[in-house]
Image: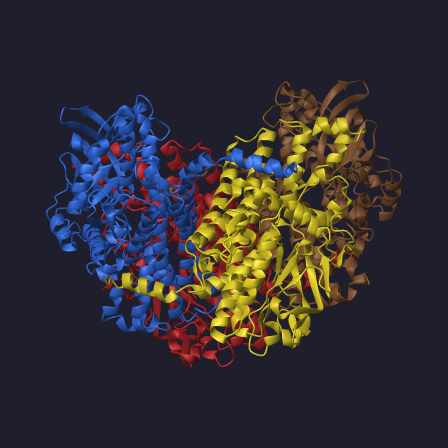
Chain colours: A red, B brown, C yellow, D blue
Amino acid sequence: MAIKTADEYRERVSRLTPRLFMGGEKVEDLMAHPVTRSVIEGTARVYDLTMDPRYEGILTAASHLTGEPISRSLHIHQGNEDLQNRLKMARLTAQKLGTCNYRCPGIEMMPSVAATSWEIDRETGTEYHQRFNEYLKYVQKEDLVVSGSVTDTKGDRSKRPLDQDPDSYVRVVEKRADGIVVNGAKQHASGAYAADETLVLPGLACREGEEAYAVAFVVPNGTEGMTYIAQYNPLSMERQYAGDRRVIGNPLYGQRETCLVVFDHVFVPWERVFMCGETAYTRPLIERFAKTHRMNCGGACKVGFIDLIIGASQLIAEYHGVAKASHIVQKITRMIELNDTCLGCAIAAAYLGKEEPVGSGVFMPDDAMSNTAKLNTNDAFWEILALAGDITGGMAVTMPSEKELENPEVKEYVTKYLKAAVPAEKRMRMMKFLQNWVAGTHGVGTYQGSGPSQNQRVALYRMTDLEEKKKMAEEVAYGKS
Amino acid sequence: MAIKTADEYRERVSRLTPRLFMGGEKVEDLMAHPVTRSVIEGTARVYDLTMDPRYEGILTAASHLTGEPISRSLHIHQGNEDLQNRLKMARLTAQKLGTCNYRCPGIEMMPSVAATSWEIDRETGTEYHQRFNEYLKYVQKEDLVVSGSVTDTKGDRSKRPLDQDPDSYVRVVEKRADGIVVNGAKQHASGAYAADETLVLPGLACREGEEAYAVAFVVPNGTEGMTYIAQYNPLSMERQYAGDRRVIGNPLYGQRETCLVVFDHVFVPWERVFMCGETAYTRPLIERFAKTHRMNCGGACKVGFIDLIIGASQLIAEYHGVAKASHIVQKITRMIELNDTCLGCAIAAAYLGKEEPVGSGVFMPDDAMSNTAKLNTNDAFWEILALAGDITGGMAVTMPSEKELENPEVKEYVTKYLKAAVPAEKRMRMMKFLQNWVAGTHGVGTYQGSGPSQNQRVALYRMTDLEEKKKMAEEVAYGKS
Amino acid sequence: MAIKTADEYRERVSRLTPRLFMGGEKVEDLMAHPVTRSVIEGTARVYDLTMDPRYEGILTAASHLTGEPISRSLHIHQGNEDLQNRLKMARLTAQKLGTCNYRCPGIEMMPSVAATSWEIDRETGTEYHQRFNEYLKYVQKEDLVVSGSVTDTKGDRSKRPLDQDPDSYVRVVEKRADGIVVNGAKQHASGAYAADETLVLPGLACREGEEAYAVAFVVPNGTEGMTYIAQYNPLSMERQYAGDRRVIGNPLYGQRETCLVVFDHVFVPWERVFMCGETAYTRPLIERFAKTHRMNCGGACKVGFIDLIIGASQLIAEYHGVAKASHIVQKITRMIELNDTCLGCAIAAAYLGKEEPVGSGVFMPDDAMSNTAKLNTNDAFWEILALAGDITGGMAVTMPSEKELENPEVKEYVTKYLKAAVPAEKRMRMMKFLQNWVAGTHGVGTYQGSGPSQNQRVALYRMTDLEEKKKMAEEVAYGKS
Amino acid sequence: MAIKTADEYRERVSRLTPRLFMGGEKVEDLMAHPVTRSVIEGTARVYDLTMDPRYEGILTAASHLTGEPISRSLHIHQGNEDLQNRLKMARLTAQKLGTCNYRCPGIEMMPSVAATSWEIDRETGTEYHQRFNEYLKYVQKEDLVVSGSVTDTKGDRSKRPLDQDPDSYVRVVEKRADGIVVNGAKQHASGAYAADETLVLPGLACREGEEAYAVAFVVPNGTEGMTYIAQYNPLSMERQYAGDRRVIGNPLYGQRETCLVVFDHVFVPWERVFMCGETAYTRPLIERFAKTHRMNCGGACKVGFIDLIIGASQLIAEYHGVAKASHIVQKITRMIELNDTCLGCAIAAAYLGKEEPVGSGVFMPDDAMSNTAKLNTNDAFWEILALAGDITGGMAVTMPSEKELENPEVKEYVTKYLKAAVPAEKRMRMMKFLQNWVAGTHGVGTYQGSGPSQNQRVALYRMTDLEEKKKMAEEVAYGKS
């Protein structure tokens, strides 16, 4: 069977030996380090949920290549219903993990590779699509975790790649008979070190002369020449030093963990290369990925997070005895409105989605609606954090450690003075969960994930038919009927 | 054929003699008075568009009662595609008229009457549904304009109907063998005086003891005892006294014209009564109407208006020579984002719509999404007006009359000094069109139409399953997997 | 005595014969035409208030030239307390008129002319300042209404004056021994046709070669060659045709009335010219005017309007019986917050004001705070309109004419059905007053008056010392102490 | 001399032995523990700045009791200029520390104690004011750090103190001849464990019967019966475990550190009790503190933070090579506008401040403006974080540790791939500084510090004279002149 268990994943990951550094030190054992372990737990949970019959059709699909049941994390959208189910998957895993579903970025890239490789082949006679399909069959069969990476390190943003350190964007430095050699690095790679594979797409729309940068490929974890340098922020350190993970805001799955993936003369055999030099197709490749990513990660995933934040805020309000106060009701209502707005735009993106390119069989969400979903989410998420942080009160940042509940010297005080309409333990747990949202990395993470607002705005302006609207206005203004 | 022409409508309306007052005077001839004529022109245009083959399926449908092609303005939604087409109709007529499609309110009420009469009959053994179907066949066959009215005059909002002047809400004052006699008045009735029929729904969720108020019925235009008192604001007067309607912002169709409809002992035969005393069903009747209304009039219709405003704002920016300025691009982009957000929520409302009650065959949009669409529109529309009024510059309120362009004494000055990158005539026309939006009745009209935000917020809070979200939050917070 | 009565003003204005057109027709009698009369009533009221001992020191001041008591409408700020009193004057007249104090634009320009003419003289040896002081003594003595005009018609905004119709900006077309001849037109001139004088400032920061446009001067009402073309919008027409002004939203004073003032070879004697060719001083001249204007007209005046809107909204809420509802309290509170924010920034602008240029004796408000006051007002005012229009309900746009209250055929119905917790007359009056705000010209008028947001934003960015803030950030980031 | 050096403070603090717990463990040495040390460093810096002649008059004042120069941190406002200087002090220390000036809360309480004790004495014949003055002379002479605490733990917010665990609010449990014994705990006490003294005010407006809760007093650090339980969040842990503090966002001063201060039968001699049982005065005591706190900590202090964030955002934009992009300029401009708005309202609060109660000699900021300043800051700060987090890009949350720059295995990669228009070291440092803001505790901290928005809204609504505004509206609506 093509759908694997969480234990099969754990078993595979226990054999991985990526060259990984975090906080200035080498991470020797992915399974043992508290931070990398949280990534593994999150991924394993997605495997578990995929086996859960309640989520059949949401987390699973039938492969369009083999007809076999597969994980939706490896499925190419074949219609609007697939897009809607993809949405549901994003929301569901967000609700269950409270952090990144590390299988998402890959599956947001793969439909774009499927569509664009088909298009390149048809128009230029290459064989990328067939290669990609073979690769897809392989990962579907093995049910592998395919991580995805697109954001180059970029160096000076005012310069093109060839006007600065040429490795500022991932590029081909050598073409051989058996494959290519690549250099450069990708940023913000969610959970790459605990994935079976890393799929790499170009991070800029290339111009003529920038052929070396028009490259898409996939490599197995820990390929020679690859180094992973993990993010390291206060939440990483909290997990690393907490001892008991039960005192962390999101005990099992933590925050989204990313890394910088460095490619230092990494060799990739041709069968794993899906674009190489076709600059004209970099823009569609990126835009197809972007709109899929914006609908799911930008839109529906955050709806799942907001579900959690609403639930937790309501609980805290109840714990404090203020849930019926009119200003609390108003804030919860505003959170619901924001949540439904993000969701509504994502649903519309799926509903209006189309086969693209026609004939490819691949369905893409609507351009305008996926960008609009993401734009709404960007602003909504910060507002949600502000609303939740209003409801928590100052304790969300000033609370003592839950370890004090077991500290014989102060246990009595903490129990006595941090109780509300519920015992202190209960209140502190939910408060800590909310701290993870309102005083963590989620505001910026959500805003920047799948690109900042300015990207969506530029896209939206470009794709809107202003001429049509001008004509409409003229008709009414001049009383034409 | 069941679809009639604009001329057939005009012919019918020319025979109507409602008792109508405006600005302190009686309106004797609907066709002749500049204000009432704008309502007729708007309605006639919808008849024209319905005949237009380009809009087949959007403005037309197949009757579920007879299978005949009918105007969608008289169609009961039979599925999600019907809801989506209803949306498209709302946006389309808004784009074409720049004001109210006066056939909308009626057709937002009729599905609710269809669904709720079916439900009452099934549960209480009445025969309302059959009556309604007979009536529906009649209006479908004749392709009549059915205006709808729901908002009671309410008097003191802190009191129930029976605690104040009992006519503050429309009520049955007498039941006879052949029908009922009703008293009271409905506010904000869009274009009622130029409609063939007026459908009346209860405006409050009745409690026990308030049976007299649980009444739904339909009356032909100008039934004895009915008086129409028209709204009268600066835009009404502008049209009344302009002489040449070409100098008005929306020359043919004007602003949305409404009236107060007074029922002074009006007799309604039983075959036109669709609810009478069933207090328990007033809430579902209203809520089904509300959500349909909020998706269409609250959501999609305003998307059509915003299309016009975006088009006109872009034109003015081009006329002024500033369309490429980054802050103008940013404002146009923001308008697009707001427009797509409103549209996205409306589409989601249609997509998530369901048969309600199950077995009735009637489809209703999703509760949460229709309310969310309206909530977004409320705020978005004011912001759109502010953005458009930012792009116009002060001239949107300070411009002289376009009549000066034909005034020999100043024509030269106006031509010379009000030109920009285009001649003064062109610029003044589009500026006047925008004045109609940014300095007119649309901000409040849009906000209040289909109910103010507070109504949607109360609905949204009530219908959200907070328990489910609390459970989700607890699972992640306690590290359950 | 230098302070004149309202009747003295009325007497003067009754002798004015400006060449004025409105709605395509010539206005023959300023005192008789309902629209121009509203301007005169507003101005006369300011004269009345100035005589009122309660407002001594706010509406009056001591002339710095003669020591005589004068109207503050003609006073040059001599210190921060003067700026604070100027603020109070703006708020007070706004509260009393509910529309433009037509004496304001002039007195927002005069301090700038005083300061800049002093500066030009000192640096270039001209005699503008002495001329201006002589002129000022004259108008102070006679207590004249000095209207001000700055906005050129501009034509194509992407072009400089010399790259298009050269009259698109007011300019000197001839210099004679006894004076200059000017051409061009100024827009948005508030109440110019009912003022004794019109002061004209350049509307753009001139560059070398544009000397003809660097011109400031003052002309008496109706000087030969001047034509006034009045704005004409629905509210103008309402007033023109209402018959009884008691049924208008703001019965006595109406909306702000402006006009296009055309200068067709108008001769101005040298003693009335305060700048002529000094391009380098056009920017400071404009900026000094702008910040004074933004503090007063942009800031404090609108605070007075918002006071009225809050009062009226609270009344309507009470009339409807909903004033204690939590969402109404919340909306009123938000209006108060916005009002205090605009006021706070204006007060800070006055508090931080400085003598500028040093030695001139003229005080100017703070640059950053005056722009910030205006920016806040721009957004706040639209939000205030939305909030007020939320509280009114739909009746703010759908209400019938108050004339129906005297129409024997429907009087009873209107009385019965439009009453709430108060009689219909009372409710309709306050509703009509609010209609004037929420469905009128105030959103755009407030936004554009003293310049749109983009102007303030550009100013704010330019004047902020980012280097200082960068240095602060570096110190903390690098742990310097 | 009454102004002491940083070393004198350090010397005192090194002798303190509060019973302090953090993260489940006892803190034995305040000077040695990385977290408590950051509080000491911040406080010491304020001592240093106070000696700096550049800040004379801002950080110093003349004692109204002795005429001696003292630290403004211990000065009672004697006029509006004092209030303005107090504002400048708040902004200045915020700019220098990037975190809490731990001397602020105390000095925001002391004027309220001065004013209210004077009032109680005058009206009830007590001697609190004299006691307070003696105490004040003592701390002024020794230049002690007086920490302040007001927020009770509250338990179930829907219940009064006597309806639940009576210790949920700090209270007198025994009155003796020589003093009182108190029980309870105060939350959110900023830096209390490193202060010389802790001043305690009642946290609720007491009713009759709640005399035990109407208590104000001051205790030295580490008084018997006091236990301090420190906040413990990811940023605390980062500092605890970082080893090298140079890799922390705010290396020297960190985040605001607070604690829960427990009073377990703590004895306070009468000379340190400033209110005991006078329930009627608890509301004015709290409100006077609140408005002072809201002007300074709520308003001006955050302006200093925003200065830092603007500076850092501008630097990052420059480092990335995008500082001239129009959307970046627009975001920086928006940050400036928000900053000036908060500052403007705070300045207006000081400008409009008054002696309160009249005769007391104590000046208080304006009620409405101090609340408005805080309300603006609450929303502005979250928006500032969102804007800054937009400019940083995702790296603000995904950046690796700066320790990698010294890790020989990856140093080269990090240097190569994290450089932009500046070297990686420089960029990482400023990015880490911004991480501290955009992914830290500041959103909630700022929002909740000096009370959440709902408190200010309730205050603002209560204190606004709606009757006066209603009257104004009626005058204009009815055309009275």
Front residue (pair A125, B33): B33
Q: Tell me which corner region of the image, top left, top right, bottom left or bottom right, holds residue D216.
A: top left
Front residue (pair D467, D391): D467
**Residue A363 makes an appearance in the image:** no
In the rendered image, residue A422, in percent from the top left (x then y), is placed at 33, 31
Q: In this picture, is B298 found above or below A359?
A: above
* B46 relative position to C394: left or right: right
Q: Tell me which corner region of the image, top left, top right, bottom left or bottom right, holds residue B281.
A: top right
Q: In this picture, is B401 found above or below A166?
A: above
Q: Tell me which corner region of the image, top left, top right, bottom left or bottom right, holds residue B434.
A: bottom right
> Where does the C terminus of chain C fall, quadrant-wise?
bottom left
**Residue D251 makes an appearance in the image:** yes
* D194 relative position to C71: left or right: left
In the rendered image, residue A140, in percent from the top left (x then y), is placed at 45, 59
Front residue (pair D430, A239): D430
What residue is shown at x 36% (from left), y 67% (from top)?
Answer: C467
Q: In this picture, is D195 found above or below C258?
A: above
What residue is shown at x 76% (from left), y 58% (from top)?
Answer: B402
* D437 relative position to B278: left or right: left
In the rendered image, residue A28, in percent from the top left (x then y), is placed at 24, 62
Image label count:
0
What residue is shown at x 47% (from left), y 72% (from top)?
Answer: C122
In the rendered image, residue C347, in percent from the top left (x then y), is placed at 45, 50
